[in-house]
Image (cartoon, rainbow, N blue to C red):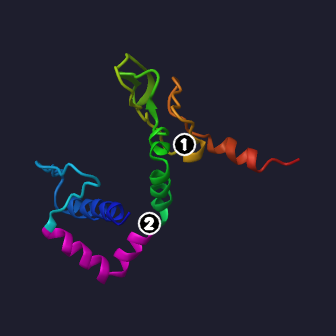
Amino acid sequence: MKKLSLFIILIWIGGLTNTQESNNIPILKNLPQGYPRIYITQDEKQGLEKIIQKESWAQDVLAAIHKRIDKHVERHVGDPEWMVLRLQMYWKTKATNVYVNGIDYAYADGEAPVPTVRFTGSSNSATPYSTPKLENILTYMDDPSGLFLPNRILLFWSRNKVS
C-alpha cells in the first residue's frame, strides 16, 4: 500500500513540475516491469521521501490519497477481480470503432477478439451526469448506448421526494 500511495503522489508531483517546465510529456525508455510503476529514478526517490517527511503539505497530500484509495486497495487484496470487473469497457460488444458527432459520442461498432476500453464521450458544464459509485456498477456492464452515468437531477429529485 505504501508503494501505491508513493506512486500516486509521484505522478501528482511530477505533473506539477513537468507542466511548469515544458509542454512535452517525458516517456521513459525502460519502464520497470513490476507494479506499481514509479516514474522517478532511484536517486530521485530519496528526495521525494525527504519532501514527504519534511513538508506538511506533502504529508497532507499523501494522507488524502490514502483516505481515498486505501479502501479500494484493501478490497482488491481480498477480491482481486472486483475492481477490474467494474471497469467501463466494451465487455460484450468488444467495439473497435467509435463514432462521434462533432464532439458527442454517437455509437461504437466492430468486434475485437478481447474486451476493449470504452470511449468516455464528452460533456460540458450543463451535462447533468455524475460519476457512478463503484458499488453501483454491475460486473461486465456493457450498455450499447454509452457509459453508465447517473443523472444528477433525477438523483436529487428521487432523494428529496415530497410525500
Distance CA(mark 2)–CA(mark 1) = 32 Å
Which amino acid does the dot numbered 1 rest on?
Ala
Please provide percent x and percent y for residue 126: 54, 42
Residue at x 50% of width, y 45% of height: 125
Residue at x 44% of width, y 36% of height: 122
Q: Residues within 10 Å of mark 1 (few under 14, many from 20)?
A: few
Q: Is residue 3 magenta?
A: no
Judged left or right of residue 89, residue 24 is left
- Location of residue 149 (image quadrant): top right
Q: Which residue is mark 1?
A: 126
Magenta stretch? 43-64
Residue at x 59% of width, y 46% of height: 135
Please provide percent x and percent y for residue 162: 85, 48
Q: Which residue is mark 2?
A: 66
Please provide percent x and percent y for residue 8: 33, 60
What's the magenta bit mostly, secondary-structure-wise?
A: helix
The foreground one among 71 and 47 is: 71
Q: Name the secondary structure under disc 1.
A: loop
